Image (spheres, rainbow, N blue to C red):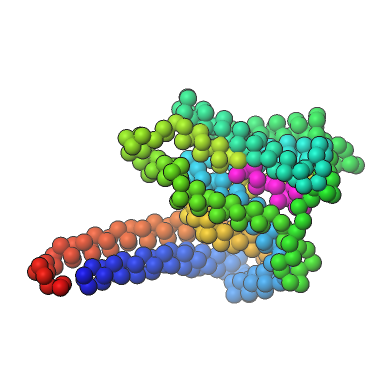
Amino acid sequence: MSSFLDRLTGRVRLGGWLAVAAPVIAILFAVLITSAVLLVAGNDPVEAFRTLADYGSQPPTMALILNTSVGYYISALAVAVGFRMNLFNIGVDGQYRLAAVVAAGLGGAAVLPGVLNIVLTIVCAVVVGALWAAIAGVLKVTRGVSEVISTIMLNAIATGVGSWLVSNYFGVLNGNDLATRPIPDDAHVPGIPLVAGAPQPVNGFIVLAVILGAAYYVLLNRTRFGFDLRATGQSETAAVASGVNVRRMVVATMVISGAVAGLSGMPELLGASFKYSNNFPTGLGFTGIAIALLGRNNPVGMAVGALLWAFLDTSSDALQLLNISKEIVQIMQGVIVLSVIVAYELVHRYRIVAEQRRVSRELAAPAEPEGAAA
């Protein structure tokens, strides 16, 4: 009994150590590479990192980081749903932008008053995102079209369709700015004063982001659907043998991913700009891919990744005070993603080797005589 407990304790210690080692290695490697780039550019790395830290610790910047991270996190959740089934939904960008256009047009029309208009706008975004993602799922199961190719093409189509809708149906001219009608004041999602000393509140959709993260965890780890989804992602052949309808799972997973993607633009639409225009944020889908990789599809890990990404994005302007190009931050972001991928792969290989050595030692050890444990 004692030997069994010792082995179990050793596995727990090994797993915990490796779980911490991977992100630490990634961060150290990213800092090292970024410092080398700064040195080559003739800048002081220590001063640059100190400036980033000082700027990011100010209350206004902290509130901005939280607001920026909300959309990033929801987008990462949309990508992660597909990743868990080995589906690469590259079309989150088109799904949330088209959903935002239609939702903005409906919300600006004020068909319903107040809170009902908020609900209607959100439901509209969810439905549009789900239907647009479903196209890629149906193409995959009926014609064998790779979801990577179809979602990339659908991104371009969504951009064109969105522009056409704004130009011909939803848009109104305000000077030289073409945008949808503003959503009425009674349909704005109120902010939350989470950061003391910040002039602006935190976007109220942070509550929805937390709920979505919890729902993501429960769906994938506490439901039969989540089990089938993960099983299909790990081995489609084994899933089919166990009775899983893989074709239906592909479509359902893409629909769920698209539905979550449709929510990515809602923090901006209902909590900040209240209309869709040329200034509406772009690229959330591709940022979500990076954050999903950074967080290893874990809801907590992706939350940390979203905060880190938002911190780097919002703090980049501070580097210009040191005559450092803010594109250095983009280099840092890319290095972080690559570092995480490499670090987790190294740790994964080390875990396999360590497990093989442990099994070899146990097989080589003399067996305890019966009754010795008693």
Q: Residue furthest left?
A: 369
Left or right, 54 with reference to 190: left
Q: Residue furthest right?
A: 175
- Judge by depth and name the residue closer to the eye, 302 or 339: 302
Residue in view at x 9 percent, y 69 percent: 369
Q: Is residue 262 magenta?
A: yes
Left or right, 282 with reference to 17: right
Q: Is residue 330 magenta?
A: no
- Say if residue 117 shows up in the picture: yes
The number of numbered badges drawn on the structure is 0
Judge whether 29 appears above or below 238 on screen: below
Q: Which residues are magenta?
A: 260-273
Judge whether 346 appears above or below 285 on screen: below
- Judge by depth and name the residue closer to the eye, 27 or 230: 230
Residue in view at x 81 percent, y 36 percent: 111
Quadrant of image for the C terminus = bottom left
- Say if residue 178 shows up in the picture: no
Residue in view at x 84 percent, y 45 percent: 184
- Judge by depth and name the residue closer to the eye, 369 or 341: 369
Judge whether 210 appears above or below 235 on screen: below
